[in-house]
Amino acid sequence: MSTTSSPDPCNALVEALDLPPAKDGPLSGARFTVKDNIDIAGHRTSFGSPAWRDTHPAPVHNALCVDQLLAAGAHCVGKAVADEFTYSLDGESQFFGTPQNAKAPGRVPGGSSSGSAASVANGLADFSIGTDSGGSVRVPASLCGIWGMRPSLHRISEAGVLPFMPSVSTVGILAESLPLLEAVARVLLHSQTTPVTAPRRLLVLSDAVKLALPAVQQQLRAALDEITRRTGLVAEPIRFAELIGEDVALSDCNLKALRDLQTAEFQSTVGNWIEATRPELGATFTLAYGNVQRFDRIAALESLARSERLFQQINAALPPGTIICFPTTPTTAPLKGSLDTLEAVTAFYDPTMTLTAFSGVARLPEISAPLLTVEGCPVGMSFAAGHYQDESLLVALSELLGPQGS
């Protein structure tokens, strides 16, 4: 079995780099890492797979989002470990090892932007860029106790980012603080100085809260009470069916929309190469890939239509000034090595993806804030706004959280 050693003691990096900024800018002095499915010129991109890395040439150009950051004054210090083909939410890699979860030792960091989150949480970088389709930025942000943002779908250029699940995948950001997250987001989003809408209504997605552990629910309620005390904005519980005006379960966002769409697209973007080359695959990925191989692509066509309908229904309920919140993940990080049976994997993935699929299907900007702590382990609290309301969401969090967001 081929393995690759990490150049840092927390196992967050595939390769340490020293790429100086192209010029001074709003990110001058900040260090960043890049998930290893995003191109750095002259360095092979692994996609979390040594076989992919060894059979593809090094790119000639950086991904455009990397050049944006270098031109804004940031310093790139490494390529971060990614889960195999970024098709995972746990962060354990058979080939590159498991990045260290600094705030929950002995537990997984979450994936697939595992190294990106670990590089920030362990102080190797101030921020990192990763990718998110089913939660691959938000989940590691939650489990590692840092800030993470999934922007509106395709707001950030994906030129030079390996194709994964185009209908739901986006470049995302992980950062040590909300002010830095906002600064990076404004660079990547090409933000203009246009007016944004202040938060006027705060909804709580009650179906999502009920999926979380009782201790997570308790911590979330305490955080909401603090927001109300600070701002006077009362949190309004709302069920998913009430939000969209149709008797549909929140789990349908995942089980009857996002999951089918992701599987069919993965067959096209990565599955073709796997079938043609028969590379060495990790044991965990092999188990998941069996489902991909057996999947009926025609079944996904109905999910395309369902995803579009959910996108329209959810966004109609989130006009400017409305923020909706819920736990980013329903639990703390699982122990390393504990996701070793189908039952354990299902128990972690199904409720987690029920939460993350909400913004994925609706193409919403979502920010995971490190506000909750359960038995000494971090859990994120997510805030989302309507599609293309990224800047308003960033401003809203500063107003809602105050010193908590520093």
Image: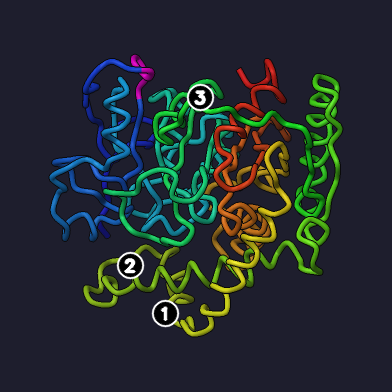
For the point 73% across and 35% down, the residue is: 374
- Indicate which disc residue 176 carries: 3
- Indicate which disc residue 98 carries: none
Q: Is residue 29 magenta?
A: yes
* Sequence-earlier tag: 1 or 3: 3
Q: Is residue 143 visible?
A: no
For badge 3, the amino acid type reads Glu
Q: Which SS type dominates the magenta stretch? A: loop
Q: Is residue 383 left or right of residue 157?
A: right
* Disc 3 residue crowd, few under 14, some 14–19, many 20+, Cα 10 Å: many
Disc 2 element: helix
Question: Which of pointers 1 and 2 indicates the residue nearer the eye?
Answer: 2
Measure how far apart labels 2 and 3 are at the Cα level: 32 Å
Q: Is residue 339 magenta?
A: no
Tell me the residue that label 1 is attached to.
293
- Indicate which disc residue 270 carries: 2
Q: Is residue 41 above or below residue 262?
A: above
* Disc 1 residue crowd, few under 14, some 14–19, many 20+, Cα 10 Å: some
Q: Is residue 341 visible?
A: yes
For badge 2, the amino acid type reads Val
Task: Answer with the quarter of the image where residue 99 lies.
Answer: top left
* Disc 2 residue crowd, few under 14, some 14–19, many 20+, Cα 10 Å: some
